[in-house]
Amino acid sequence: MLALPLHDLPTRSASGFLIRHVVPRAEPPQLVGPLDRKALFSTLSAGDAIIGVGHGDPARFSGYRDQVLIDLSSIPDVRGKVVVLISCQTARQLGPALINAGADSYIGFLEDLVWVMDAESASTPWADKFAAPAMMPIVNCVNTILDGKVTADAFVVLTNELMRNAAVEEEDELIAACLRFNAKNASLLGNPMARVKARPKVAFPLPPPPLFPYLA
């Protein structure tokens, strides 16, 4: 399952990179934009992975317009699944709770997930050169999972690429600091040898059309 809200600049930025680089090879269900609601999210249990973008805190993960999709008192069926939450702070409490509920493995962040974004790229966020150094390591982490490799390998891809990009972006102190912060606070919980069924690769996915206008 992919959960990709688009209701504000951060969710459009992160979801946009997954729409460009992950959606073409991912299986349904794909809850994009207004479809990313609790009523749908909580009833769909197919598949071996949950990849979610959204706002979060230690105990909650939210979807479209900040509807709470997962919290400590309402955890969906995650048994046997690999869960990746591209969100703030969920590794503190929610990640361990997902593992306790039967998830095989979880990747997320202990603190806020921070990156620089260009508001002018809101309709084509995958083309945002400021966000790419933070978002492409996440994309490559997810695609490593979809390649059928173990989550330990995917986590190494995430953290190594964040640190490598920080070195490349050293002249931009803000971007470099964000990348190092995210690498430090990335978290892998559960079975590091967990893996999902490999999905076919899409060598050159066509760029999606521009996203619908952002409505505040």
Image: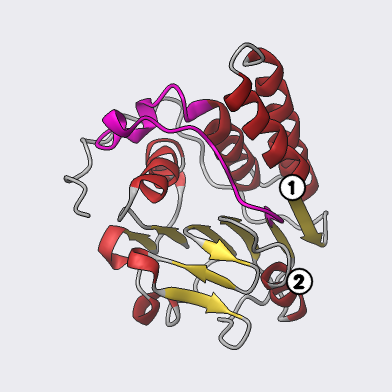
| Residue 96 drawn in magenta | no
Q: Do the residues labelled 1 and 2 touch (CB within 8 Å)?
A: no
Q: How crowded is mark 1: few (under 14 residues within 10 Å), some or many (20 or more)?
A: some
Residue beneath disc 2 = 96
The residue located at (49%, 72%) in the rendering is: 46
State which quadrant residue 141 falls in: top right
Marking on residue 185: 1
Residue placed most toward the observer, 24 or 12: 12
The amino acid sitting under disc 1 is: Asn
| Relative height, residue 99 to residue 11 (above, below) | below
Q: What residue occupies the far front of the structure in this picture?
A: 173
Rendering colour mode: secondary structure
Q: How far apart are marks 1 and 2 (CA)?
A: 15 Å
> Is 151 left, or right, of 17 in this rendering?
right
Secondary structure, magenta segment, majority class:
loop
The residue located at (57%, 42%) in the rendering is: 114
> Is 108 left, or right, of 65 in this rendering?
right
Residue placed most toward the observer, 161 or 9: 9
Residue placed most toward the observer, 189 or 55: 55
The location of residue 197, given as percent across then percent down, is 62, 55
Element carrying mark 1? helix
The residue located at (74%, 43%) in the rendering is: 155
Quarter of the image where the C terminus is located: bottom left
State which quadrant residue 78 falls in: bottom right
